């Protein structure tokens, strides 16, 4: 009974964590798209360039984490 309750709790946590990844990924992509649109009309200043680099690094790290999560999940389901 305790294990069942823990399993349900962890399932809810995993769904919430997955939702957070999705929201954060969309937010980062939106920032990158806005900066790209601004770059099409004029040159980006150093501040905007640094923001874009930082956001791209955060997005890359987030995608890497998500990829590792799915790789671990596929290994667990194969066993």
Image: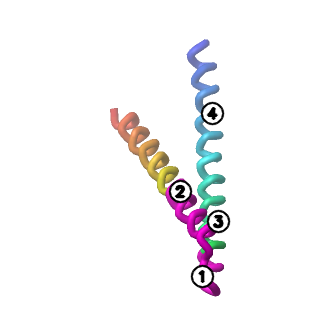
Residue 31 marker? 3
Inter-mark Cα distance, 4 to 3? 27 Å
- Give the quadrant of residue 76: top left
Label 4 or label 2, whichever comes before in sequence order: 4
- Residue for badge 1: 43
In the image, farthest residue toward the front = 46
Inter-mark Cα distance, 1 to 3? 16 Å
| Foreground tag (2 vs 1) | 1
- From the viewer's perspective, is 64 left or right of 51? left
Q: Nearer the viewer, residue 9 or 58?
A: 58
In x, y percent, where is residue 3? 56, 16
In the image, farthest residue toward the left = 79
Q: Quadrant of the N terminus?
A: top right
Q: Nearer the viewer, residue 21 or 73?
A: 21
How many neighbours does mark 4 have within 10 angstroms: few (below 14), some (14-19), or many (20 or more)?
Answer: few
| Residue 67 in the image: above or below residue 36 | above
* Residue at x-position 59% and y-position 44%: 18
- Give the quadrant of residue 44: bottom right
């Amino acid at each position: 009974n305790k294990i069942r309750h823990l399993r349900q709790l962890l399932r809810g946590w995993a769904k919430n964590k997955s939702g957070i990844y999705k929201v954060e990924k969309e937010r980062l992509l939106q920032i990158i798209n806005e900066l790209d649109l601004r770059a099409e009309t004029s040159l980006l200043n150093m501040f905007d360039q640094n923001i874009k680099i930082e956001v791209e690094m955060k997005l890359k790290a987030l995608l890497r984490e998500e990829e590792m999560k799915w790789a671990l999940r596929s290994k667990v389901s194969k066993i």
